[in-house]
Amino acid sequence: MAIFKVGIQLQPQATTMSSLLSTARAVEDLGVDSVWTWDHFYPLYGDPDAAHFEGYSVLAAMAAQTSRVQLGALVSCNSYRNPNLHADIARTIDHISEGRFVLGIGSGWFERDYEEFGFEFGTAGSRLANLGRDLPIIVDRIGRLTPPPIGSLPIMIGGSGRKVTLRLVAQYADMWNTFGPPENFAELNGVLNAWCDKVERAPESIERTVCINGAEVDNWEAYVEAGAQHLILMSSDPFDVDGAAKLLEYAQG
């Protein structure tokens, strides 16, 4: 039995669709548990005018060309889609993938996306409030769609806010994602457990995932000790397939 799950985020910037899809197939063959992308409209680093692709379209294509791995956005921005539409897109990709989709969601933060695509940026507080408003709408819509999802369509919430975000995770999420270092992850993991107690949610019912970079692969044990169950390697093109392979070796013990 694996010590932890292994995922890889294929960032859709400064790349091609051919590279994204061929790598998704390659890492599935390698044995990873999950493949992710992100939900932005412009590169987050490097050349600000580099090629970039919309995340949910990429995920639909990956769903059609893979057969085993979980797929999702790490994480999608609540502000970019009406919550009912967000639920329907996720349900539809779940059908394309035959039940492997994860609805990853967060409150949003990348101001350039908002400004250039005409979304209201607001404040960190208003975006979080909107996420709290929209999550029950998303859950309700998923429950009323025909046909329903094929899989369990888990909800992943990404973020580290101690007062609001982690409370929303305890209330609504099946998976939680944040970043390191391990000490930070351990502290936030404890805060989430406390929120679970407050809302009478079993802490073990929420899968704990963490994003790591290539330099952190060898530090996997510290993350597992901090409570991480699913390590996701962030990678831009050329994608770090070797790093994913190394994580898989560690995961097998």
Image: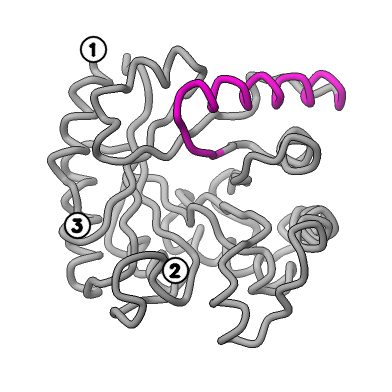
Q: Quadrant of the C terminus?
A: top left
The span from disc 1 to disc 2 (Cα, nearest Å) is: 33 Å
**In the image, 176: left or right of 142?**
left
Type of amino acid under label 1: Gly
Q: Quick one: 224 or 24, which is closer to the camera?
A: 224
Q: Which mark is residue 55?
A: 2
Q: Residues within 10 Å of mark 2 (few under 14, many from 20)?
A: many
Q: Earlier in the sequence, mark 3 or mark 1?
A: 3
The span from disc 2 to disc 3 (Cα, nearest Å) is: 15 Å
The residue sitting at 80% across, 37% down in the picture is 163
Q: Earlier in the sequence, mark 1 or mark 2?
A: 2
Q: Quadrant of residue 189?
A: top right
Q: Residues within 10 Å of mark 1 (few under 14, many from 20)?
A: few
Q: In the image, which residues are magenta?
A: 177-199
The span from disc 3 to disc 1 (Cα, nearest Å) is: 25 Å
Q: Quadrant of residue 199?
A: top right
- Label 2 residue SS: helix
Residue 65 picture location, percent across and down = 27, 62
Residue 245 picture location, percent across and down = 16, 34
Type of amino acid under label 3: Thr
Q: Quick one: 233 or 95, which is closer to the camera?
A: 233
- Label 1 residue SS: loop
Q: Main secondary structure of the magenta part?
A: helix
Residue 145 picture location, percent across and down = 71, 64
Q: Earlier in the sequence, mark 2 or mark 3?
A: 3
Q: Which residue is mark 1?
A: 253
- Label 3 residue SS: helix
Q: Which residue is mark 3?
A: 23
CB under 8 Å between discs 1 and 2:
no
The residue sitting at 38% across, 69% down in the picture is 58
Count of marks placed on residues: 3
